[in-house]
Image (cartoon, rainbow, N blue to C red):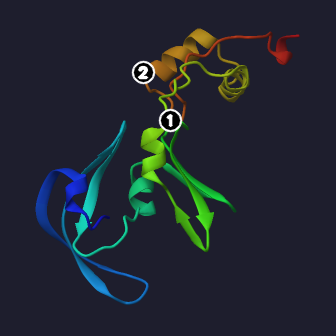
Amino acid sequence: MTGNIKLLINFVWKFLGTVRFGNDHIAAILGYGDLKWGNITITRVYFVEGLGHNLFSVGQFCDADFEVAFRRNTCFIRDPDGVDLLKGNHSTNLYTINLYDMASASPICLMARATPTKSRLWHQRLSHLNFDTINDLAKNDLVSGLPKFKYAKEHLCPSYE
């Protein structure tokens, strides 16, 4: 949710209901759009006129199959492949994510190949299936939860020694 309509692209004016805040104030959701910040795009961001801060809906991220986790000093949002999309900090009973810091960070290369540990783990989880078959399963999205990586046999499986 945002109170700044200028942050949104592809905006659709549509009354979507109301939200109630912790202080019992009620505000109307007047529409939605996409928020693009650097290489990050968050879709269906609600516009709430008068909202002073941008707020994330944990439920919307979870509905989109993203992982949202809160720890003592940090929080993060990961995509279904386990890649961190957003990270935040915890202070004074509030978790905050600074999009300015994220947009200014230099681009990074995301992992395209599973680590030996992940390869071995999925090899074991799939009843010691050969790695070519695991790669086919990942490529064709045939196993729910199997990350889309290139799986490689790094060492002889301990079961075969």
Which residue is located at x 69 percent, y 24 percent? 127
Q: Is residue 33 visible?
A: no
Q: Return the x and y of residue 97 as percentages of the image width and height.
A: 49, 56
Q: Is residue 37 visible?
A: yes
Identify the residue under disc 1.
Answer: 144
Q: Return the x and y of residue 101 as percentages of the image width and height.
A: 48, 47
Q: How many marks?
A: 2
Q: Amino acid at mark 2?
A: Asn
Which residue is located at x 38 percent, y 82 percent? 21
Crowd tier of the residue under label 1, counting other residues whose Cα lies within 10 Å: few below 14, some 14–19, many 20 or above: few
Crowd tier of the residue under label 2, counting other residues whose Cα lies within 10 Å: few below 14, some 14–19, many 20 or above: few
Q: Is residue 152 above or below residue 127?
A: above
Which part of the image, by quadrant, shows the C terminus? top right
Q: Disc 2 and disc 1: Cα gap in Å? A: 11 Å
Q: Which mark is residue 95?
A: none
Which residue, as the protein is rendered here, is positioned at the far right? Answer: 161
The image quadrant of residue 20 is bottom left
Contact, mark 2 vs mark 1 (Cβ under 8 Å): no
Q: Return the x and y of residue 99 as percentages of the image width and height.
A: 43, 50
Q: Nearer the viewer, residue 46 or 127?
A: 46
Q: Which mark is residue 140?
A: 2
The image quadrant of residue 12 is bottom left
Which residue is located at x 42 percent, y 54 percent? 61
Element under disc 2: loop
